[in-house]
Amino acid sequence: MFAKKKVRLKAKGVWCFGLIIIILLSYNRPSLSNDTDSAKIPPEKLAAFGKTLIFGTMTPLKTLELRKNSVGKAQCPLCHMFFGEQKASRCPNLVGIEMQSHLRPKEERYRMFSERYAQKGEPNTGIKPHATSGGEYLIESLYCPNCYVREGFGIKGTKDMESGMPIIDQPPIRLTDFEIVAVIAYLQAADTLNDFSKVTAQEDWEHYFNKKLPISEKFASFDPPSNSDIVDQPQVFPDDTPEQIIKKMRCNACHTISTIKNAWGYDGPVLALKANARKRLESAEYQRAKKAGTAHATTPREYVKESILNPDAFIVPGYPNVMLKDFGDRLTPASLEKLVDFLLTLDEPLDSEQ
Ligand code: HEC
Ligand code: HEC
C-alpha cells in the first residue's frame, strides 16, 4: 500500500513535469502550438528563391563596381556588396553578415537602440527592437532599418541614429513577408558557402513576429537549380595574389589586415602574424592547449597554418570560436602556402595606419 502510493506520487510528478514543459513550450510560441502543418520550407529552395529576388537571376554579374551588378526586385545590390572582391561603398559590406548578425543583438549599441524605442517603438514602423538571435537581427534590419544603425553608416548629421536604408516591406521595394524571409535565407546560406544548416530564416521570422509565415504562391512553382548553384563558390587559381585569395575566402569579413583595402573585419584579431605568431606560441594559453593535446605548432609558420586549417586547435583569448572550419577543403595546398607566407610578412600596424 505504501509502495503503491509512492508510485502514484511519482506518476503524478512525471505528469506535472510534463505539463510544465508543455506550458513552457507554448508560452513562447502560442500561435504555433496549434499549427500542425507549419512545415519547414526546404532551406536550399528558400535561399535560391531569395537569390533571384536579390539579383533577379541565379547567375548574377559580379562586377567589382556596385550598380553594374545584377539587381533584382529586392534592390539590395544597389547599395550593398555581396562578393568579397567588390569595392567598398557607403553601405555595410554584406559579406560576413551571417556571422556578424549573431554578435549584433549582444552589443551595447543594440541595447541603446532597444531602450530608445522601448516605449513607443521606432517612429516609422512602430517596431520595438527585440531581436534575440542573429536571424532575428537580420529580419529586424529589413523591416526597421532605424532599429539599429551601424556606427559610421548612418545618414550624415544624425549621429548614426538614422539609416539611409529603405524599409523593405514598404514602397517602393515592398517585399512580402515571404520574400523577406527568402532574402534572409540567401544571406545566411551565402556566408557559409552552402552550409544550409545556418538557414534559420523561417523559424527566426516566426519567432520574431510570433505567427506563422504565409507561404507565397509563386514559391510553389519556383524550380530551383541544384544546390551547388545557389551560392557561387569562389575558385582559387594558381596565379591569384594573396589579396585575391583572402577576398575569395572572405577572411577580410572578420579580420583587419593593414595592407589590404576593405579588410576591416573586427570579429577576429588584426592579422599581424610576423609580430604575433611567436607571442601566441609562447603564451601560457597556447602551452596549455598543447598540454591538452589540441594544439601542436612549434614554429610561427606552423601556428599560422594550424590557425587556418584547424581553428579549434587554439582559440585566441578574448575571441569567439567562429572561424569556418573548412578552409582546408577550399584552399589548394599551393594557395595555402602563399597565404601563410603573406600573413607572416605582416607586422603590427603602425598607429597611423589603423
Ligand atoms: C538605398 C541603399 C540600401 C538598400 C537598397 C538596401 N540597404 Fe541595407 N543598408 C543600407 C545602409 C546605409 C545601411 C547601414 C545603416 C544601418 O545600419 O541601417 C544598411 C544596413 C543593412 C544591414 C545591417 C548591416 C549590419 O552590418 O548590421 C543589413 C542586414 C542590410 N542592410 C541588408 C539589406 C538587404 C538584404 C537589402 C535588400 C533587401 C538592403 N539592405 C537594401 C543601405 C541600403
Ligand atoms: C567568421 C569570421 C572569420 C573568418 C571568415 C576568418 N577568421 Fe580567422 N579568426 C577569427 C576569429 C574570431 C579568430 C580568433 C579566435 C580563434 O582563434 O579561432 C581567428 C583567428 C585567426 C588566426 C590566428 C590569429 C592570431 O592572431 O593568433 C589566423 C592566422 C586567422 N584567423 C586567419 C584567417 C584566414 C587566413 C582566414 C581566411 C582564409 C580567416 N582567418 C577567416 C574569425 C574568422
Image (spheres, grey):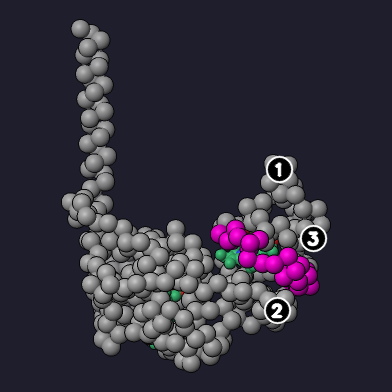
Could you tell which of marks 1 and 2 lies nearer the N-terminus? 2
Indicate the position of residue 196 as horizontal and vertical percent values: 45, 61
Residue depicted at x 45% and y 67%: 227
Circles 3, 2 touching at the beta carbon (< 8 Å):
no
User: Callout 3 environment at 10 Å: few (<14), some (14 to 19), or many (20+)?
Assistant: many
Residue depicted at x 68% and y 46%: 294
Q: Residue furthest bottom?
A: 68
- Please tell me whether mark 1 or mark 2 is closer to you in this view: 2
Q: Quadrant of residue 42?
A: bottom left
Indicate the position of residue 123 as horizontal and vertical percent values: 26, 78
Name the residue tied to disc 3.
300
Where the C terminus falls, by quadrant? bottom right
Q: Amino acid at mark 1?
A: Gly
The relative height of residue 114 versus residue 93 in the rendered view (above or below) is: above
Where the N terminus falls, by quadrant? top left
Quadrant containing ligand 1: bottom left
The relative height of residue 207 versus residue 63 in the rendered view (above or below) is: above
In this rendering, position of residue 299 left or right of residue 109: right
**Near-viewer residue (126 or 261):** 261
Q: Which mark is residue 293?
A: 1
- Please tell me whether mark 3 or mark 2 is closer to you in this view: 2
